[in-house]
């Protein structure tokens, strides 16, 4: 009798991917406060990674909470500061079970003249932030972006920023 093969999105396959780390091609950088550089993974890449790890039909996401009214302040001369918060749940379907993780995220925009555009962008930012925070709870794969040692190795490697131990990268 032939051994039964693991499903591409079965529990062990998911665990192996979630225990890995992202390749350099997923890590983006933006300016942060005080001139520091902040690393992040784009929303599009997070969705691609979730589809790869869980399968396109192996998970669902839900926005659970969007507090209203949003804090909107006129800061000067028709310029606005807008803040938003959101709570998101990711539910993964594996081996007949549902496993969920929830997280809150925030978004903020300051100094814009278009209040409605700022409200929309901050809401999207809050939902994306919450999605990433919830996904981080499933394993190391997205969490590695907050590992200073990993980021140093990633930036110092000679091969176009590839992490030295490529066998455990989520690619």
Image (cartoon, rainbow, N blue to C red):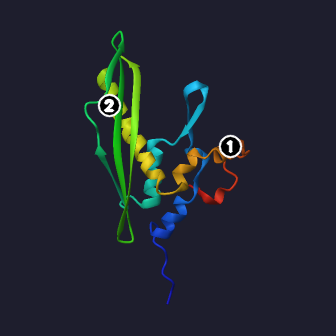
Question: Which sits earlier in the primary sequence, circle 1 or circle 2?
Answer: 2
Residue 74 in the figure: left or right of residue 50: left
Image location (x, y in percent) of residue 75: 37, 15
Residue of label 1: 152
Residue 149 in the figure: left or right of residue 136: right
Q: Secondary structure at mark 1?
A: helix
Q: Label 1 to label 2, Cα distance in Å?
A: 35 Å
Instruction: Tell me if residue 89 comes above or below residue 40 in the rendering.
Output: below
> What residue is shown at x 68% (from left), y 43% (from top)?
152
Residue 121 in the figure: left or right of residue 141: left
Farthest residue in the left direction? 69
Q: Secondary structure at mark 2?
A: helix
Q: To which quarter of the image does residue 95 belong? A: bottom left
Mark 1 closeness class: few <14, some 14–19, many ≥20 residues within 10 Å = few
Q: To which quarter of the image does residue 82 belong? A: top left
Q: To which quarter of the image does residue 33 belong? A: top right
Image location (x, y in percent) of residue 103: 39, 47
Image location (x, y in percent) of residue 110: 41, 22
Mark sitting on residue 28: none
Closer to the camera, 159 or 106?
106
> What residue is shown at x 40% (from left), y 29% (from top)?
108
Farthest residue in the right direction? 158
Residue of label 2: 120
Do the residues under discs 1 and 2 have CB atoms within 8 angstroms?
A: no
């Amino acid at each position: 009798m032939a051994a039964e093969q693991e499903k591409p999105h079965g529990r062990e396959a998911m665990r192996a991917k979630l225990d890995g780390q992202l390749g350099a091609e997923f890590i983006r950088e933006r300016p942060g406060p005080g001139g520091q550089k902040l690393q992040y993974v784009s929303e599009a890449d997070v969705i691609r990674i979730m589809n790869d790890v869980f399968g396109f039909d192996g998970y669902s996401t839900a926005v659970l909470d969007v507090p209203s009214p949003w804090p909107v302040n006129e800061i000067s001369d028709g310029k606005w500061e807008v803040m938003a918060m959101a709570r998101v749940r990711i539910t993964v379907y594996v081996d007949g079970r549902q496993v969920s993780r929830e997280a809150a995220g925030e978004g903020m925009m300051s100094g814009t003249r278009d209040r409605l555009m700022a409200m929309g962008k901050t809401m999207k930012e809050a939902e994306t932030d919450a999605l990433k925070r919830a996904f981080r709870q499933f394993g190391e794969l997205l969490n590695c972006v907050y590992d200073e040692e990993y980021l140093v190795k990633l930036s110092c490697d000679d091969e176009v920023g590839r992490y030295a131990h490529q066998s455990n990268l989520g690619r």
